[in-house]
Image: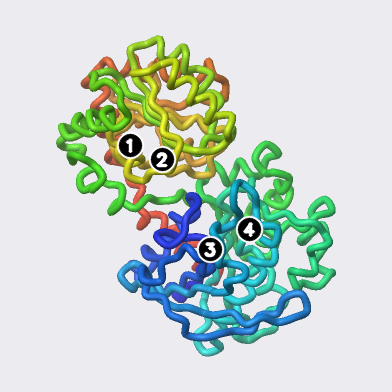
Amino acid sequence: MRILMLASEAVPLAKTGGLADVAGTLPVELARLGHEVQLALPRYASIDPQASSLRQTATVAVPIRGDSVEVGVETGALGNKAVSLICIRYDPFFGRAGLYGEEGRDYPDNLERFVLFCRAVLEACRQPTRPPHVLHAHDWQTALAVAYLKTLYRDDPAWAKTRVLFTIHNMGYQGRFPVMDYPATGLPWSEYTPERLEFYGQVNVLKGGLVYADLLTTVSPTYAREIQTSEFGHGLEGVLQARKDRLFGVTNGIDYDVWNPATDPHLPAHYSAKDLSGKKACKTALQREMKLPARNVPLLGMVSRLAFQKGIDLVVEIIPKLLELDVQMVVLGSGEPAYHERLTDLSTRYPGKLAVRLAFDEGLAHLIEAGSDLFLMPSRYEPCGLNQQYSLRYGTVPVVRKTGGLADTVVPYLPVGGKGNKATGFVFETPQPEVLLSTILLALKVYRDKEEWQALMRRGMKQDFTWQRSAKQYVELYERALG
């Protein structure tokens, strides 16, 4: 099968969030299954051309706002050359410091930037003799490619048989723009209707992907159900309800070559479900790195964007009560300034018990996953979530809220069930500080039973969250779209 994948970021070339992990890993896994995969990205200034042997091989003329611009097409490869890489180069739009904005503000011309990207990909990948069987687009930045394929390119024989799968990674990001910017899309006004791209007097780019695609997916089965409700649908729940027979949830996988405590180069010692001895050395190294006393007490870890969505407000609320206990806690992340200030203040008040690093640090993230005993993810919503999967793999028992992918990947510990149940972590439902605290207290109680705790750790480490499993589910959906 020939698959053309469009994304606005992908590891290892450009990343701001979990979308990049999916877009960079899924194509490689699809290629391992025997499929012919092309991945199309904008050519950001931050992309290292040497990393994927990028070189310009063509130019294409792209219509925009009644004019036409020449853009470069650079080609290379990913995944030991298993995946063909196509980068759209137009430095006035993509030769900037950020992917979508700088200093917390979106670029004001983001609509035009991704209009250009979507049109350029369709022009650059137009192969009448060997067209893609499936175009797989991700999030609002690529949604217009879906709309173009079903409107402007509808009668183009090169694209006539290509089917479209559109993946939603987070309904909170929709690409909304003023109606005065609609002409930049290049679409006729007949498409600006409540049934298509109009959304309460604005242009909603994500909506275009939802209404034009042959099939829709999101990144976990529970999130696929949640986004059909007013609480999680962000105003588009009606559109999703109308297409629920074409909406599927596929849980993201993780790269076990990168996230594996038996081989992880970021760790001072390695370990596995069969031999957990190296985890103690990782804990000691984490305490040393974060300037905490090397004590044998429960160590809670958190690696997160510091935002309301992630439930960080619940965490800062319970820290004073939690640290009255004989425990330690480390937090790594960045986000909203108010949480930066609050966490910094708390770390000053509780030296030797709470350590905070306000940054992004890949190596430290790996060490926190390995060196912590428990990992906190109290998200208000979480489409999929990757850190709870990393935690399970690293024998670090997750404490999560029952939402989205967290609900699909963590089996809750049930005190009534006693020992021997299938639990892999601790789960709570109501997003309130006291509920989170009581769940952590339950976890700490179980922690004192070393035999039961190790059984819990090992069950988590044996879970299968490989991309191979997820990729096979995508292939089934591609075949369904073609059928």
Q: Residues within 10 Å of mark 3 (few under 14, many from 20)?
A: many
Type of colouring: rainbow
- Spatial CA span between label 2 and label 3: 22 Å
- Disc 2, disc 1: CB below 8 Å? yes
- Disc 1, disc 3: CB below 8 Å? no
The image shows residue 321 at horizontal and vertical percentages of 46, 12
Q: Residues within 10 Å of mark 2 (few under 14, many from 20)?
A: many
Mark closer to the chain start, 2 or 1:
1
- Spatial CA span between label 4 and label 1: 31 Å
Query: Badge 1 is on which residue?
Result: 369
Mark closer to the chain start, 3 or 4:
3
Mark closer to the chain start, 2 or 4:
4
- Disc 2, disc 3: CB below 8 Å? no
- Spatial CA span between label 2 and label 4: 24 Å
Q: Is 210 placed left or right of 189 in the picture?
A: left
Query: Badge 2 is on which residue?
Result: 387
Q: Secondary structure at mark 2?
A: helix
- Between 374 and 48, the residue placed more toward the observer is 48
Query: Badge 3 is on which residue?
Result: 7
Instruction: Give, as a three-letter code, the residue at label 1.
Output: Glu
Query: Badge 4 is on which residue?
Result: 140
Q: Is residue 35 visible?
A: no
The image shows residue 28 at horizontal and vertical percentages of 37, 65
- Spatial CA span between label 2 and label 1: 8 Å
**For residue 124, which quarter of the picture?**
bottom right
